[in-house]
């Protein structure tokens, strides 16, 4: 099994190197690991009749690369050594007291939301995607998207009524 996994990894390393864009060079090892885990899991479950053709492995590498691109675009991750975007408009700087006051106003507006919307927006602000929130709250994804969308709109209206704008 060890030799087999080592050979699989070698093929996946070559495949990822060919399909991975240059800006994801730092994540190549992670992508290879994800692709390898998928292939081994499918093999363990007995799917694909344990046939691992080279085209199948290349497809696994391609899929893992696309998943990584999607994950990074959702999370908007930036490498620590990346140069800051000089064209971006900087957010206004607030002193400590203003930030504290804004935080209190946000909490107040969150408290005014209907409980289902408050939970959905709270999970959204914590970084949960709609699918994750739906799973946590035992709801349907579309319902969670609607609660989040409407809850954020309510939150914006409440904050704007208090003179707080993005």
Image (cartoon, rainbow, N blue to C red):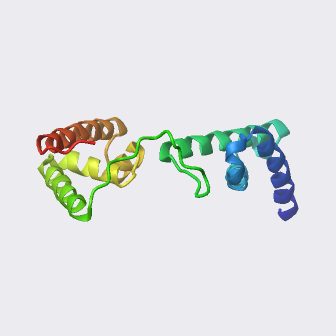
Left or right? Give the position of 98 relative to 88: left
Return the residue nearer the eye: 97 or 74: 97
The number of discs equals: 0
Q: Residue at x 72, y 49 (%)?
A: 25
| Quadrant assignment for the C terminus | top left
Return the residue nearer the eye: 96 or 140: 96
Left or right? Give the position of 45 relative to 165: right
Left or right? Give the position of 47 relative to 123: right
Please state the horizontal and vertical placement of residue 71, each as a whole percent of the image: 55, 45
Q: Residue at x 31, y 44 (%)?
A: 139
Please state the horizontal and vertical placement of residue 19, each as a whole percent of the image: 75, 38
Return the residue nearer the eye: 72 or 119: 72
Decide: is 63 above or below 128: above
* Residue 41 visible in the displayed image: no
Please state the horizontal and vertical placement of residue 127, each as a whole percent of the image: 39, 52
| Quadrant assignment for the N terminus | bottom right
Decide: is 62 above or below 5: above
Return the residue nearer the eye: 82 or 137: 82
Q: Write down the quadrant of residue 130 in the picture.
A: top left
Q: Residue at x 34, y 40 (%)?
A: 140
* Residue 166 visible in the displayed image: yes
Q: Residue at x 33, y 51 (%)?
A: 125
Q: Write down the quadrant of residue 97 in the picture.
A: bottom left
Please state the horizontal and vertical placement of residue 27, each as a whole percent of the image: 68, 52
């Amino acid at each position: 099994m060890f030799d087999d996994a080592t050979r699989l990894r070698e093929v996946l390393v070559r495949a990822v190197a060919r399909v991975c864009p240059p800006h994801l060079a730092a994540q190549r090892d992670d992508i290879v690991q994800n692709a390898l885990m998928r292939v081994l899991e499918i093999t363990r479950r007995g799917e694909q009749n344990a046939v691992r053709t080279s085209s199948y492995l290349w497809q696994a590498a391609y899929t893992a690369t696309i998943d990584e691109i999607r994950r990074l675009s959702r999370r908007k991750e930036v490498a620590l050594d990346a140069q800051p975007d000089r064209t971006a408009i900087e957010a206004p700087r607030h002193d400590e007291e203003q930030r504290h006051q804004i935080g209190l106003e946000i909490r107040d507006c969150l408290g005014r939301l209907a409980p289902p919307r408050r939970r959905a927006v709270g999970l959204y602000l914590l970084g949960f995607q709609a699918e994750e929130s739906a799973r946590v709250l035992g709801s349907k994804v579309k319902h969670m998207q609607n609660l989040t969308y409407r809850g954020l709109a309510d939150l914006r209206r409440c904050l704007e009524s208090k003179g707080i704008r993005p």
